[in-house]
Image (cartoon, helix red, strand yellow):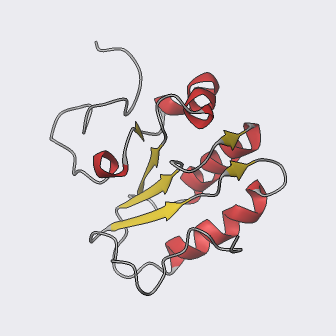
Amino acid sequence: MSALPFLPRPCEPCDPPGYAVLALPPEIDFCNAMGLLPMIMTAVDHHCGPLRTLVLDLSATRFMDSQGIRLLSEVRHRLPGRTELRVVAAPQGVPSRVLELSGLRRDVPVHDSLAEALRPPSGTARGSGGRAGGGAAP
């Protein structure tokens, strides 16, 4: 496994303008969570052009503990002012359950697929629908 599994490869297509997509590793726990933080922030700092949305793709992540929640919270707080954090997590996976139990889903939109996470906001209060944003309707 590469030390930087989520950094773009030269042969892969570029992210849509204003977006950076980083695929996270199969496990996020005390062994690697804090090592991932500087790599994620370096990718944010070196993004070409203005970054509006950072998408952290947990599709391949099969295990995540409280250190993963801590990592996502830290990334969210370190992002530049108007940069939004979105997360992709399989609905039935461990990361999705951990995000729900921690309450982080109230603050960070969680999407079922990368395509859903890359959709621009629809102009509604909820954005792109799906599981994003959590919480009950008013």
* Residue 127 image offset from top left, x and y in percent: 25, 38
Question: Considering only vertical position in the picture, is 26 above or below 100?
Answer: below
Q: Give the quadrant of residue 100.
A: top right
* Residue 17 image offset from top left, x and y in percent: 27, 71
Residue depicted at x 71% and y 49%: 28
Question: Considering only vertical position in the picture, is 64 above or below 78?
Answer: above
Residue closest to the far left:
123
Left or right: 57, with 120 as reference point: right
Question: Considering only vertical position in the picture, is 41 above or below 134?
Answer: below
Residue depicted at x 48% and y 37%: 90
Q: Quadrant of the C terminus?
A: top left
* Residue 89 image offset from top left, x and y in percent: 49, 41
Residue closest to the far right:
31
Q: How many marks?
A: 0
Left or right: 116, with 1 as reference point: left
Residue depicted at x 36% and y 51%: 114
Q: Quadrant of the N terminus?
A: bottom right
* Residue 136 image offset from top left, x and y in percent: 36, 14
Residue depicted at x 34% and y 62%: 52
Residue closest to the far bottom:
10
Name the residue nearer the viewer: 17 or 25.
25
